[in-house]
Image (spheres, grey):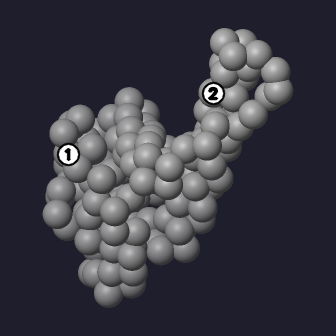
Amino acid sequence: MSVPNSGAARRPPPAGIVSRGLAVLVDVFVLALVGVVVEVGVGCARLLVVGPPFQMPDVPNWLAGAFGWGLAVCYLGVSWVVVGATPGGRLLGVCVTDRAGRRLPAVRALVRAALAVSFPLGLLWIPFSRRRAALQDLVVRSNVSYDRVYE
């Protein structure tokens, strides 16, 4: 009677659209909270420089949108390079790697982040993909899977 090689490393399964969608919602909440903290911080800095009354900054929509886009791209890209997952991904047990299972290099992570922020509907390709890949995964050749194998 032969015993299967139980010590062999098994690849974790690819993450589905529900896990990834919930991770995105957590990350959107974190980014919104960071945005509010930055806005209040600018208001406090203005109060220190100009004096009373406290006033929230009145930023043009195009500038707020560009800042938010840049903040989201940096948040996602840096998280994938440094940790392999965003806080939302960590909470839901989802990590982003290259196809060999290594962390993404900085340029690929930032390109993937820019695509994810610019085209969030790319996630809708996941149910139609055999390997559960979003469109941004196909472009940068990344893999999103659960961060551990449960037996």
Q: Tell me if 9 is positioned left or right of 138 in this view.
A: right
Q: Residue at x 76, y 16 (%)?
A: 51
Pick the front one: 20 or 29: 29
Pick the front one: 32 or 44: 44
- Percent of width and height locating residue 114: 30, 53
Give the residue furthest to the top: 49
Label 2 and label 1: CA atoms lie apart by 32 Å
Give the residue furthest to the right: 53
Q: Which residue is mark 1?
A: 108
Q: Report helix, strand or loop for mark 2.
A: helix
Tell me whether the residue at label 2 lies in contact with that at label 1, contact meaning CB atoms closer than 8 angstroms.
Answer: no
Q: Taking the image as drawn, is residue 13 in sight?
A: no
- Specify few, some or many for label 1: CA neighbours under 10 Å numbering under 14, 14-19, or 20 or more: some
Q: Quadrant of the N terminus?
A: bottom left
- Specify few, some or many for label 2: CA neighbours under 10 Å numbering under 14, 14-19, or 20 or more: some
**Looking at numbered disc 2 in the image, what kind of residue is underneath it?**
Val
Pick the front one: 10 or 24: 24
Q: Report helix, strand or loop for mark 1.
A: helix
**Looking at numbered disc 1 in the image, what kind of residue is underneath it?**
Arg
**Mark with earlier residue (2, 1):** 2
Q: Which residue is mark 2?
A: 42
- Percent of width and height locating residue 134: 32, 71
Q: Taking the image as drawn, is residue 130 in sight?
A: yes
Give the residue furthest to the bottom: 128
